[in-house]
C-alpha cells in the first residue's frame, strides 16, 4: 500500500496536468509558475536540511554519497551508451560548432542561482530550527502543484506520448541510459551501505535535480534528497561541458548522458553540435526519462 498511496497522488497530479486543458494556465504562466515554485521548494528543502541535527556530518555524508554515485553513473552509463551507439547507430556529428560563451555563462548563472536558494534555505533552517514544523508537509503539497504544472508544460509542448515513445533511436538511448544508471545505483548501494531500493531511487532523477531532490525529501529522506540533488546537479553541469567532446564520438553518448535534461536544458547545445535533426530524438529521450522520474523514485522508496 505504501507504493500505491505515495505514487498514486503524484501520478494523478502529473496526468491531470497533461490531459486536462486548464485555460488559466497559459504557457507563460506555467513557465513562470514552475520557475518560482522550483526555487521556493528548493529553499524549503534547504530549510529542512539546515534544521537537521548534526548538520555538518550529514552534509559530508550526502556529498560523499553524491561523489561515489556520480563517478559510477558517469563511467557505467557512458560505456553503455558508447556500446549502444556502435550497435544501433548514433555516429558523431560532422557539423561541429562552438557554443556561444553567453550560453555557457547563462548555464553557470542558473546553476549558481539554484545553489543560492538551497544554501539560503540551509542558513535560515540552521538559525531557525524551531520554525521547522510542517516544512516537509508544505514541500509535499507544493510537489503536487509542481507535477501538475509539469504535466501542463508537457501537453503545451505538444509532446504526444505515442509519437515520442515510437522514436526508435530515442527509445534505445533512453533504455540504455535508464538501465545503466539503475545498475550504477544498485552497485553503489553496496559501496555506500544503502539499501538496494535507496540506491535505485537516488539515481532515478536522470539529471533532473530540481525534481529528484524535491521528491526524495518530500517523501521523508532529506539527506538522501540532498545526495540526489547534488548528484543530478553535477550531472547536468558536467553534461553541458562534455557535450562538445561526446558529440564527436556518438549522439547516444551526448544525448543519453544529458538524461532528462536533453528535452530542455541541454537541448540547445545538443542541437548546435548535432544539427536540427537530433532535436526530435533529444525531446523523445528526455521525455521518456522525465516521465519515469516521478514514477520510479516513489516506487523504489516505497519498497521495503
Image (cartoon, helix red, strand yellow):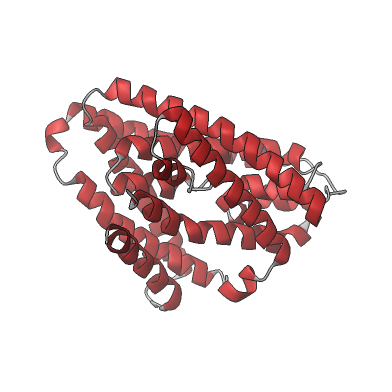
Coordinates of residue 122 in the picture (x, y in percent): 29, 31
Coordinates of residue 17 in the picture (x, y in percent): 40, 71
User: Would you place residue 210 above or below residue 121 in this image?
Assistant: below
Identify the residue at horizontal 43%, vertical 59% (top origin): 295
Identify the residue at horizontal 50%, vertical 40% (top origin): 185
Image position of 169 (left or right of 46): right
Image position of 268 (left or right of 287): right
Coordinates of residue 26 in the picture (x, y in percent): 44, 71
Coordinates of residue 15 in the picture (x, y in percent): 41, 71
Residue 106 visible, this angle: yes
Res 49 quadrant in image:
top left
Q: Residue furthest left?
A: 130
Res 12 quadrant in image:
bottom left
Identify the residue at horizontal 72%, vertical 61% (top origin): 169
Residue 25 visible, this angle: no
Identify the residue at horizontal 66%, vertical 57% (top origin): 282
Q: Residue furthest right?
A: 94
Q: Quadrant of the N terminus?
A: bottom left
Number of marks in the rendered image? 0
Res 294 quadrant in image:
bottom left
User: Would you place residue 231 above or below residue 176 in this image?
Assistant: above
Q: Nearer the viewer, residue 228 or 193?
A: 193
Amino acid at each position: 500500500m505504501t507504493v500505491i498511496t505515495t505514487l498514486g497522488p503524484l501520478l494523478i497530479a502529473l496526468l491531470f496536468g497533461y490531459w486536462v486543458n486548464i485555460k488559466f494556465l497559459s504557457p507563460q504562466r506555467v513557465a513562470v509558475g514552475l520557475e518560482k515554485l522550483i526555487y521556493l521548494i528548493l529553499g524549503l528543502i534547504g530549510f529542512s536540511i539546515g534544521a537537521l541535527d548534526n548538520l555538518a556530518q550529514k552534509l559530508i555524508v550526502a556529498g560523499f554519497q553524491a561523489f561515489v554515485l556520480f563517478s559510477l553513473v558517469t563511467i557505467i552509463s557512458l560505456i553503455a551508451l558508447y556500446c549502444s551507439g556502435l550497435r544501433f547507430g548514433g555516429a558523431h556529428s560532422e557539423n561541429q560548432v562552438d557554443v556561444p560563451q553567453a550560453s555557457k555563462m547563462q548555464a553557470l548563472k542558473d546553476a549558481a542561482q539554484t545553489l543560492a536558494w538551497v544554501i539560503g534555505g540551509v542558513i535560515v533552517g540552521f538559525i531557525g530550527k524551531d520554525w521547522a514544523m510542517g516544512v516537509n508537509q508544505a514541500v509535499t503539497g507544493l510537489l503536487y502543484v509542481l507535477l501538475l504544472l509539469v504535466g501542463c508544460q508537457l501537453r503545451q509542448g505538444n509532446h504526444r506520448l505515442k509519437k515520442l515513445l515510437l522514436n526508435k533511436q530515442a527509445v534505445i538511448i533512453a533504455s540504455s541510459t535508464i538501465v545503466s544508471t539503475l545498475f550504477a545505483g544498485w552497485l553503489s548501494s553496496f559501496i555506500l551501505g544503502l539499501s538496494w531500493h535507496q540506491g535505485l531511487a537516488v539515481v532515478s532523477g536522470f539529471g533532473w535535480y530540481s525534481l529528484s531532490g524535491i521528491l526524495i525529501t518530500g517523501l521523508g529522506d532529506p539527506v538522501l534528497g540532498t545526495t540526489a540533488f547534488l548528484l543530478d546537479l553535477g550531472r547536468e553541469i558536467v553534461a553541458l561541458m562534455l557535450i562538445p567532446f561526446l558529440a564527436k564520438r556518438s549522439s547516444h553518448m551526448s544525448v543519453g548522458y544529458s538524461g532528462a535534461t536533453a528535452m530542455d536544458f541541454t537541448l540547445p547545445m545538443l542541437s548546435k553540435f548535432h544539427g536540427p535533426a537530433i532535436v526530435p530524438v533529444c525531446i523523445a529521450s528526455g521525455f521518456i526519462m522525465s516521465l519515469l522520474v516521478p514514477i520510479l523514485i516513489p516506487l523504489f522508496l516505497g519498497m521495503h
